[in-house]
Amino acid sequence: MSSIQFLGAAGTVTGSRFLLEHEGKRVLVDCGLFQGRKELRQLNWQPPLADPKRIDAVVLTHAHIDHTGGLPRLAAQGFHGPIYCTPGTRDLLALLLPDSAQLQEEEARYANKRRYSRHSPALPLYTVEDAERALRMLESFSYGRAKEILPGIQVTFSRAGHILGSAACSLDLPSSKQRVVFSGDLGRLDAPILRDPDRLEMATTLIAESTYGDREHGETRPAEALAEAVNAAFKRGGVVVIPAFAVGRTQEILYHLRELEEAGRIPSLEVFVDSPMACDATPLYLAHSEDHDFDMNAVMRSGDGLATKRTRFVRKSDQSKQLSSFRGPGIIISASGMATGGRILHHLRQRLPQSQNTVLFVGYQSEGTRGRRLLDGEPEIKIHGELVPVRAELKSVSGFSAHADWKEMLSWMGGFNSPPRQTILVHGEPSALESLRGRVAARGWQVRVAKHLEKIELA
């Protein structure tokens, strides 16, 4: 018999982990960290739900930490490979996993210094050495190539259009004539830089994400909203602060700013990319032509790259601190995208109390994050232990999301020649999951919402 167990991203949007068992072999699809609320983050510290020593292989949909951040801990607990992914995901993980491990180590050191941990000494969830061990297990292969990763199990990657290297993963089980498709995180149609998600023709079981299962992206042309926010702040002499994920979102914002500046629709302003990760990831976006869409290929032929005339990439911490003296007008793009940590907190702490500034959110804000609380209208927000008054203009542009909305999800599902025998929804908050379930069921499909730790048999 074959089965899938949902070890994460069931009823929530983080911690993606799905264990496929087939004829005695065990494949883990994604190995992400739980993020957001404290009770979710604490799940990262629990004993492994599947013995790492008994997992035969890992398959990754893409590099985001909520899909890969558990790999170093998995390696430390006895998993010894291989880990399969696309070349783009491989290159991004070389940046993301050591960075995540360094943050874990720094948090443990800070806890020991301040003595606020219940454990003595406080230990990191994993170390840089664990991350490097996981990276040595990576094996990459290109889109559209069927590869037998274990006896009786083949994997094919298809473009998902979410971030560089993102893929929908098809696991073929020839002995039982089954194809299990994991959508991963699907990107939007006609988004810049990356090609649209590939259409798939067949699945017996579909595991589909539901991040925006209850919403449409209101702005059909998000660059318009970006131009409006930049021009309004420019007239006030203010700074536009953009919390943005270092991988994917930052590159898309840079693409649009360059286009708007070239068209004369925004003034030529100082643009600071204050994120070492974004500084390193941007050249990777330029290097992987297999992911580029038609327009991005034209940009590459022109030699312009992803930058306005006055873009500066800020790596060093002292350069970041110097931005506090920048009066504007201008734009600061910094991570993290949900304002849960990173250099963006320093910029928010300084710019939120000033009414001439704008904080522009360009991505999904999970429940419980600082970004969500700001958008929900909290009059003051705690940053680094200090309550900061919120007087800056707050705006959100959903059209920049790297996730397909419900209409785009249904459009992608419409590419199958016939409905899968079963469709199981994951990676969404309860309202989004239930909303998408109803819409998929209305098409006559057999569909359900996965429950945490639920195990289903594949007929």
Image (spheres, helix red, strand yellow):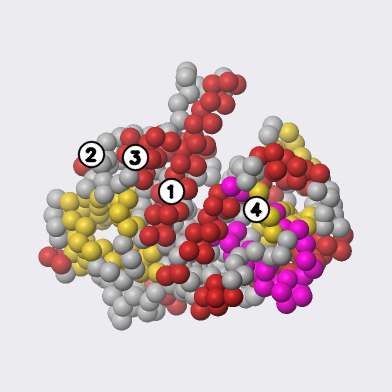
- 368 in magenta: no
Identify which amino acid the numbered label 4 is placed on.
Phe
Foreground mark, 1 or 2? 1
Judge the density around disc 3: few (<14), some (14-19), many (≥20) Cα neighbours within 10 Å: some
Tag nearer the camera, 4 or 3: 4
> Can I make out residue 64 in this image?
yes
Residue at 81% of width from left, 44% of height from top? 325
Label whose residue precedes the other's in the sequence (4 or 3): 3
| Circle 3 residue | 133
Label 2 crowding class (10 Å Cα cut-off): few <14, some 14-19, many 20+? Answer: few
Label 4 Cα neighbours within 10 Å, binned few <14 / some 14-19 / many ≥20? many
Q: What residue did someone put label 2 on? A: 53
Please provide percent x and percent y for residue 55. 23, 45
Chain part drawn in magenta: 247-276
* Relative vertical location of residue 78 with respect to residue 373 in this rendering, above or below: above
Q: Which sits earlier in the primary sequence, circle 1 or circle 2? A: 2
| C-alpha span from label 2 to label 3 | 15 Å
**Image coords of residue 381 (percent x, y):** 72, 41
- Mark 4 = which residue? 313
Going from N to C along the chain, the mark reached first, 1 or 3, is 1
Image side of residue 315 versus residue 214, left or right = right
Residue placed most toward the observer, 246 or 354: 246
Question: What amino acid does circle 3 point to?
Answer: Arg
Which of the image's four quarters has the C terminus? bottom left
Q: Report which residue position mark 1 lands on.
A: 94
